[in-house]
């Protein structure tokens, strides 16, 4: 939830203090919203995020005994949790993804690699789930995210040094593929 409109670097800086002050859902469920705001104040939309985190923690305590549920259908009904977040939780924490995580990097690379023609995350996820074996869903998500951050970024993809250049139908013109229209 903290990562929306924020960098991983920023989230990784904010979370140690947040988790030190509130180590679990029970603690966050009774937290003062302004205290949480101060702890996540360096992140984009911090007021909304603080409110949502406290709200979510209350629901986790009420509905799930303070534990994060391990089923997609239980996760996606929680405020601020969509398929992407649910699949991250299921894949990373529970080692049982129900789909492929489609963030901005996965979306861009799936289009550049011609694995999808779609632009909506849900449709891209369905295409990737058909193309990638289930046991690789979590790994492929992480690999595409890593590759999208380090090599195949949106504005200046490094096609010349790309290790999968020969497999990419968008090589040498990738900056024009898989980007949101202005």
Image (cartoon, rainbow, N blue to C red):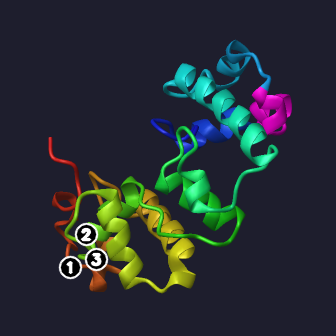
State whether residue 39 is above or below residue 122: above
State whether residue 124 is above or below residue 83: below
Q: What residue sits right under mark 1 in the picture?
A: 169
Q: Position of residue 74 (x, y in %)?
A: 61, 54
Numbered disc 2: secondary structure: helix
Residue 157, quarter of picture: bottom left
Q: Main secondary structure of the magenta part?
A: helix
Q: Are marks 1 and 2 in contact (CB under 8 Å)?
A: yes
Q: Position of residue 38 (x, y in %)?
A: 68, 17
Instruction: Please tell me how crowded label 1 is: few (under 14), some (14-19), or many (20+) other residues with Cα within 10 Å.
Output: few
State whether residue 119 is above or below residue 59: below
Distance of mark 3 from mark 2, alpha carbons? 8 Å
Q: Is residue 180 left or right of residue 101?
A: left
Q: What residue sits right under mark 2 in the picture?
A: 112
Residue 147, quarter of picture: bottom left
Q: Which residues are magenta?
A: 16-29
Q: Is residue 23 left or right of residue 11?
A: right
């Amino acid at each position: 939830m903290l990562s929306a409109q924020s960098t991983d670097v920023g989230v990784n800086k904010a979370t140690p203090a947040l988790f030190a002050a509130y180590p679990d859902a029970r603690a966050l469920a009774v937290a003062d919203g302004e205290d949480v705001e101060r702890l996540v104040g360096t992140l984009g939309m911090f007021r909304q995020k603080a409110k949502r985190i406290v709200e979510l923690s209350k629901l986790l305590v009420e509905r799930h005994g303070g534990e994060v549920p391990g089923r997609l259908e239980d996760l996606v009904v929680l405020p601020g949790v969509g398929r992407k977040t649910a699949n991250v939780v299921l894949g990373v924490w529970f080692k049982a993804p129900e789909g492929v995580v489609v963030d901005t990097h996965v979306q861009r690379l799936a289009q550049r690699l011609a694995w999808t023609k779609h632009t909506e995350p849900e449709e891209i996820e369905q295409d990737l789930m058909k193309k990638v074996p289930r046991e690789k869903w979590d790994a492929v998500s992480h690999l595409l995210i890593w590759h999208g951050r380090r090599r195949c970024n949106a504005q200046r993809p490094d096609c010349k040094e790309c290790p999968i250049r020969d497999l990419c139908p968008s090589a040498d013109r990738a900056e024009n593929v898989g980007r949101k229209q202005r």
